Image (tube, helix red, strand yellow):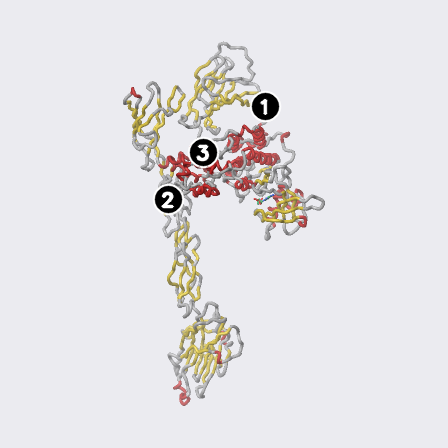
Amino acid sequence: CTLSHVTTIIYDNYYFNVCTSNLVDFVILFQWEVVQRTLNGSQFYTYSVCNVGEREQDNWLRTTFIQRRPAASRVFVELQFIVRDCNSFGDSSVTCKETFNLFTSESDADVGTTFRKGQFKKVATIAPDEITSKNELHINTETRVVENLSRKGFYLAFQDIGACVALLSARVYYKTCPATVKSLASFPETVAGGENQALREVSGVCMDNAISEELPRIYCTVDGEWVVPVGQCQCKSGYEEVKDACQECQAGFFKAAASGDKCEPCPANTQKLNSGALVCPCMDGFYRAPTDPPTGPCSGLPSAPRDLVATTTQLSTGKLLLSWQPPEDTGGRSDITYSIECQRCEGVVCQSCGEKIRYEPASTGLTDTKVSVSELDAHLNYTFTVEAHSGVSLFASQIRNILYPLSSDPPKITSMRLVERTSTSLSLSWDVFPRPRVQSRPIRYELTYRKKDDNLDVTTYIVLILEKNFVQISKLAPGTAYLFRVQALSSDGTPGGSSMEEQFETSLEERLTQNNTAVISCAAVGGAAMLFIVVMVLFLRRRKRNSHTRQGPEDTYFSSSEQLKPLKTYVDPHTYEDPNTAVLKFATEIHPSHITKQKVIGAGEFGEVYRGILKVPGRKEVAVAIKTLKPGYSEKQRQDFLSEASIMGQFSHQNIIRLEGVVTKFKHAMIVTEYMENGALDRYLRDHDGEFASFQLVGMLRGIAAGMKYLSDMSYVHRDLAARNILVNNTLECKVSDFGLSRVLEDDPEGTYTTSGGKIPIRWTAPEAIAYRKFTSASDVWSFGIVMWEVMAFGERPYWDMSNHEVMKAINEAFRLPAPMDCPSAVYQLMLQCWLQDRSKRPRFGDIVNLLDKLLRSPDSLKTIADFDPRVSIRLPSTSGSDGSPFRSVSEWLESIKMSQYSENFTCAGVVTMDQVLQMKNEDIKNIGVRLPGHLKRIAYSILGLKDQTSTLSVFAV
Ligand code: AMP
């Protein structure tokens, strides 16, 4: 039999594996013959020989060629046969035998009917356990092993030397260890070894979602059994073992690391996420302190301390004892400390008590519930605030107050009242809640007022920006009612809650004949700093009648009035039934022989990007970038690839990448554009960190804004504006590129995009575009703000290593990126404007170009630098090691601020410990060879941050 073709026949309750198909293929040699026998009514064939009466028998039966599976070096031969009792032959019993011999011969090829006895080796003599007499039939089964086979196949042969034998079946097989899964590793079916390799070592593969440190192994024995598994696989984090497989942790459970453990239920105050959680993040309002294990419970902020009591002890010396009770709710923590704040209030105006006052033992970090305050002035009113803190409150307040210092929540206006009035002036004051805290940035107020009965078509609003919570407005009309509204503004200009509209009237006396319709002038006195008295909103009531023709808020971007409509509007190539028509319409076909590819310069979405030369006959040769479409593309991919050219071909602007043409009529489609020597802007800036002055960076931004203004004028929404998609040439001119993701702004202003499957670059995308795919030029403006940040931060990644989820959460909570190092204040203010939540309030690209132009024309305007907090504006880990602990070495610190190139300078100068680093002055940094101003600043600021951090270390280990 060949190894695979064994047929089982049942005979008289015996199971016979007979290779029936091969039976006739046996090469019958001398004397053996096929005999059909009937046993108990059934017929079957046997190979038989029965020359018992004759001497010196040597009868051979040989099988056909048996192919061997390479690994099977040990083969079993199971024979079923009948041998007749010699005694039953009477006289012939003298020469009669009751055994026969099994032989084998290896070969690499089938030799057909050629038979050379000498080539066969004897394997065994086969003797029956029971011989068959005249009356009784006995079928014997014997198995023999043929070892050490090594060639492609072999023959078996049976030698009869004078017996009466009938061979019923020959079954040839080898043993395997079956495919199995042990300790979460799967092992393949393996052929068992032979004498010379009793244990076969087999390597396994961890099951899906399982991992192991050591390669899993196991041994297969000669008998086809698996033994001694080595190296365990374990389910990775977020998975647990269930029946030889790794299953995701159920919802509400988590597993933080790869182990044999089961998933654990989410600890107290954490969010029960969907299945497969690695950790359970804290619920809103709960936190983990930096020293808390990430797998532990989260704790809440402590509630306020209770029963604050002030006891005057020695009034003459201005001393006061403050004591209080611990908070009712400690948030589940024991590390409660207290801090004291003092404000001095005169009337409604409060200010910090300053440094004159002494606290014993201290004003912060108190573990006791009392403090003594001295050096107070006896005749003044003081307001003390005691705050409870714990490991998590530092962490929580840090997010709000330190990481995003510019976006603290503005307080709300609670009430507005008339303080004084004359016939021409009104004095008003108002309250805010909560009161501005000591040391916090000043709040500003936006006061808007107008005459109540302005029945003319023009209503004049006057807007004042004030720094104090009271104002005196003069030069008003006597006996006239005015309507007032106040709104608090946070430090970044974000408006908070505004007051109700309040009405106050000037008194009637001294009523003068004034011109009612004149623009009202005003002045602020009484200590109110008036910063800004400019905004006059002309509100044409007639317009209201036509308001039904107006569109949504984004109309402020794209005016509906006819005369402002851009002359040329971009056409979406997808609107063409056959996209190939669009390519032909907007792009010039180039013959491939006019293009020479020189070098791969990048990898695009569809294939390599090359630098090359375009030489069209009769025209000067130009350097070009050639985008190619990789082989094996589908028709859809080809159309998508070429759609970029159809879009680009419609633009013609200094700051938009220029399309030279396309190759569409040949197998290898290409898009050929102008060549930009310095490549993508993000990488270029990273490679030249600190090498450009602010006005150069602002110049680059101006170019990008001009390109974007052009696109928005054509009603084209880019959707993927980011520094990586801006290209820079050798004159540092920046051009907008990458029109792959983009889609046209639809006519319907309410039309929101539902294009599914598009990837959204979260960090660059406006909240409304993420939330409901509202992509407009206003969302491009948001992205432009991010590009501004990238540029001013020399290619730093926006929001550093915060996850997309964290970024979205922070933006939703009104947090914004802080100013990059050395960023001019005016530039940062513009970024903040681009990131206004209300998209209708964001500046338009036209406004942005104008503002940047203005800044470039007066370089002094770039000299005021935005507040920069070194602890947040350099990558967060720069103030401590990645695990929150201080840096262990100078090189670790330099690496974290991306200044490793100066490692040797520090070593050569003998600055080898962080203590020495902390002692360095700016001069010292220069002296050791840091020359580039940007690098100098980065290192100096980081040292500043490190110093500052000694007292607030835990705060920055976010
Ligand atoms: P893209 O598919 O447009 O993102 O291009 C991939 C990369 O190729 C870019 O990041 C650039 O580095 C490079 N590249 C693309 N177009 C040009 C060009 N016109 N000039 C120089 N480099 C380019």
Tell me the crowding category of disc 3: few under 14, some 14 to 19, or many 20 or more residues within 10 angstroms, Cα based: many
Q: Earlier in the sequence, mark 3 or mark 1?
A: 1
Q: CA distance from mark 2 to mark 1?
A: 63 Å
Nearer the observer: mark 3 or 1; the answer is 3
Up/down of 285 relative to 375, above or below: below
Q: Which label sits on residue 542?
A: 1
Please tell me which of labels 2 and 1 falls first in the chain: 2
Q: Residues within 10 Å of mark 1 (few under 14, many from 20)?
A: few
Depth check, front residue: 178 or 951: 951
Distance between the alpha carbons at the discs numbered 3 and 1: 50 Å
Mark 3 or 2, which is nearer the eye? 3
Nearest to the eye among marks 2 and 1: give it: 2
Tag count = 3
Residue 281 seen anywhere in this rendered image of the structure? no
Quarter that holds the C terminus = top left
Q: Is residue 915 above or below residue 504?
A: below
Dot 3 or dot 2: first in sequence order is 2
Ligand 1 shows up in the quarter that is top right
Mark yes or no: residue 100 visible: yes
Q: Front-most of 735 and 549? A: 735
Q: Which residue is mark 2?
A: 295
Q: Nearer the viewer, residue 104 or 774?
A: 104
Residue 278 in the image, given as x and y percentages of width and height: 41, 46
Q: Looking at this view, is 772 or 148 the one in front?
A: 148
Q: Which amino acid does the dot numbered 2 rest on?
A: Thr
Question: Label 3: which residue?
Answer: 869
Query: Which amino acid lies under the numbered mark 1 shown in the image of this protein?
Result: Arg
Q: Secondary structure at mark 2?
A: loop
